[in-house]
Amino acid sequence: MVKIILLAALVIIIETVSAQSTDSVNFKCGISTIQYAGQTYHTVKIGNQCWLKENLNVGTMIPGSMAQTDNKIIEKYCYNDDSANCTTFGGLYQWDEAMKYSSESIQGICPSGWHIPSSDEFQTLESTVNLEGNSLKAKGQGLGDGDGTNKSGFSALLEGFRHFDGYFDGINTYARFWSSSEGDPTTAYFLRLTNTGTKIFVSDFMKEFGFSVRCVKD
């Protein structure tokens, strides 16, 4: 009886490893989708990088007036404390929450096999699109000279952000994405797009702000 149970367990392990290997072999960036925490994410290849096309929307919503904490539960903000905005734009995360309170692992809250991009990876993205921010923005995002073309397929939405003291601002004006790179103990680098210009900004900012998270493949 024990031998039968052990044999069955071994078969399950082999089948699991085989399925994982097959998924890895069959993955094609730009075609394959990722299932993670009840959400489906599309993928896009930009130069030599493979990105998720949507912002992460994972975790339990808490009000913007509260700080996210290291309580083993992924917490997110939804713009204006409206869950519908998380459905549309994804969640907003303080840097420590996005990094799962560890600067040693760049995976953060991204799915396995993906990670929060470094500032260098954002600069690679910037170079790949020839410094053209509109190519990163979804069509209909932005105004005049800042109108998105989405030529890259990155599909950025101007989702706004959560201010460090708890209020929300910048919807339809800014897109801000955390990197895994720290500036100093209180700041981290992020990529910023605006609604009125083509420029891509990569600079550091206070970790207490709530920004979006976009994952890149390992």
Image: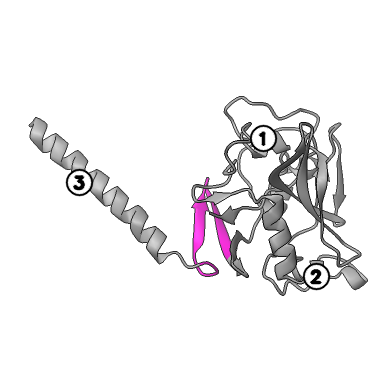
Q: CA distance from mark 3 to mark 1?
A: 38 Å
* Residue depicted at x 61% and y 34%: 100
**Majority secondary structure in the magenta region:** strand
Mark toward the viewer: 1 or 2: 2
Q: Identify the residue under disc 3.
A: 11
Dot 2 surroundings within 10 Å: few (below 14), some, or many (20 or more)?
many
Q: Which residue is mark 2?
A: 132
Q: Position of residue 84 (x, y in %)?
A: 71, 48
Check if residue 41 falls in the magenta segment.
yes
- Give the secondary structure at mark 3: helix
Q: Earlier in the sequence, mark 1 or mark 2?
A: 1
Q: Which residue is mark 1?
A: 97
In which quadrant of the rendered view does residue 50 lie? Answer: bottom right
Badge 1 crowding class, 10 Å Cα cut-off, few under 14, some 14 to 19, many 20 or more, is many
Amino acid type, label 3: Val
Q: What's the CA distance linking mark 2 and mark 3?
A: 51 Å
Mark yes or no: residue 171 visible: yes
Which quadrant of the rendered structure holds the N terminus?
Answer: top left
Q: Which residues lie in the magenta part?
A: 29-43
